[in-house]
Image (cartoon, helix red, strand yellow):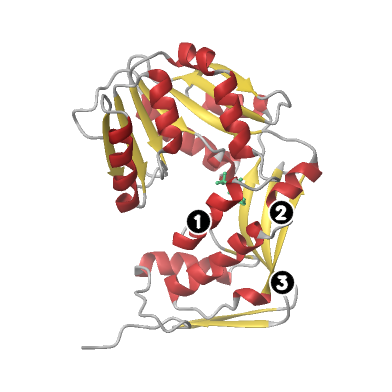
Amino acid sequence: SPTPPRSAAGAAQPLAPPAERAQVIAGLLGRPASISPKYFYDERGSRLFEAITRLPEYYPTRTEQAVLRRHAQAIAQAVGRGGVVIEPGAGSCDKAQVLCRLLGATHFVGVDISADYLEGSVARLRAALPGLDARAVGGDITTAIELPRDVPQARRLVFYPGSSIGNFDPPAALALLRQMHALAQGQGGGLLIGIDLPKDAAVLQAAYDDAAGVTAQFNRNILTHVNRLIGSDFEPAQWRHEAFFNTVESRIEMHLAACGPQQVRWPGGTRSFAADERIHTENSYKYPLPAFVDLLERAGFTQPQAWTDERDWYALVHARA
Ligand code: AVJ
């Protein structure tokens, strides 16, 4: 039988499907070059992100937890107890467990691209909350997803924590909020979403360029993942992590800058990079609350309500569908 393609490391690796490969390559050939932040999250990238959430400089995760603890009863009252919780990108379901327990939810539907990983998380959720009807659905939240037919139509709460909406520019965020609005349609439906707010640029910068260099490793790891997806030969050590706050766009930008001239090859193509030329890997928008409420209303949501921490660094926002 034919030998499968091999990565630089020598392990047998299947490439990504042709359509996905073509998309990644188009990004690399762009000027400036870019790689979608969704490719951060291979197995090592997901572990590195977990490590980021525990860094002293990375405030969003622990601040969101603090907001939920601080305002638990008010949030439960606004959202309503019982009902269905739907979480796009549910992953570990750790946050879902806290929320479903707080609300006494009757049903949970986790949605994630990596369906296998999600199945395991949902099984743990079921064990922790035996009264909860918990399901796993494989799928991409940026395209319409079908829920199992026996999940009740009424009182559907879409839960989108973690300020992941920040990865989308305003038009894409609006499109995603519209998808979520469609999911939450029906009697008593709504959205509970985490938003990272604008703040001192030095605080933001440190959160995305930590002293221990974990975010730098996370950023460079995207190249290892791309090597596996398209069979390219990026040398991650030859790329420098850069993160800064773009005040005009109100977003953190992450880039990888070439440490010297680089020639990257893959089956069927190549791209040269000059010294210091950059690959744009991520935007993390920091929406001011009024701007975000405006997006929510344009997506069809009403009666927005926000809760924040004592420094106003982070908000949990609820709105009705
Ligand atoms: C998972 C998109 C919310 O933007 O803060 C963390 C990803 N990137 N450090 C964020 C991330 C660098 C994170 N989100």
- The answer to whether 229 is drawn above or below residue 299 in the figure is below
Quadrant housing residue 42: bottom left
Residue 173: % across, % down: 53, 39
- Amino acid type at mark 1: Arg
- The answer to whether 1 is drawn above or below residue 137 in the figure is below
Residue at screen point 35% across, 80% down:
12
Quadrant housing residue 190: top left
Residue 145 visible in this rendered orientation of the protein:
no
| Secondary element at tag 3 | loop
Per the rendering, the mark at residue 91 is none
Question: How far apart are labels 2 and 3 at the CA level?
Answer: 22 Å
Residue at screen point 68% across, 33% down:
197
The residue where tag 1 is placed is: 47
- The answer to whether 142 is drawn above or below residue 126 in the figure is below
Residue 254 visible in this rendered orientation of the protein:
yes
The residue where tag 2 is placed is: 210
- Amino acid type at mark 3: Glu
Horizontal side, residue 148 vs residue 232: left or right: left
| Secondary element at tag 2 | loop
Per the rendering, the mark at residue 277 is 3
The quadrant in which the N terminus is found is: bottom left
| Secondary element at tag 1 | helix
Residue 236: % across, % down: 60, 74
Q: Are marks 1 and 3 in contact (CB under 8 Å)?
A: no
Question: How far apart are labels 2 and 1 at the CA level?
Answer: 16 Å
Q: Is 15 or 178 nearer to us in this picture?
A: 15
- The answer to whether 230 is drawn above or below residue 44 in the figure is below
Mark 1 is surrounded, within 10 Å at the Cα level, by few (under 14), some (14 to 19) or many (20 or more) other residues, namely: few
Residue 244: % across, % down: 75, 52
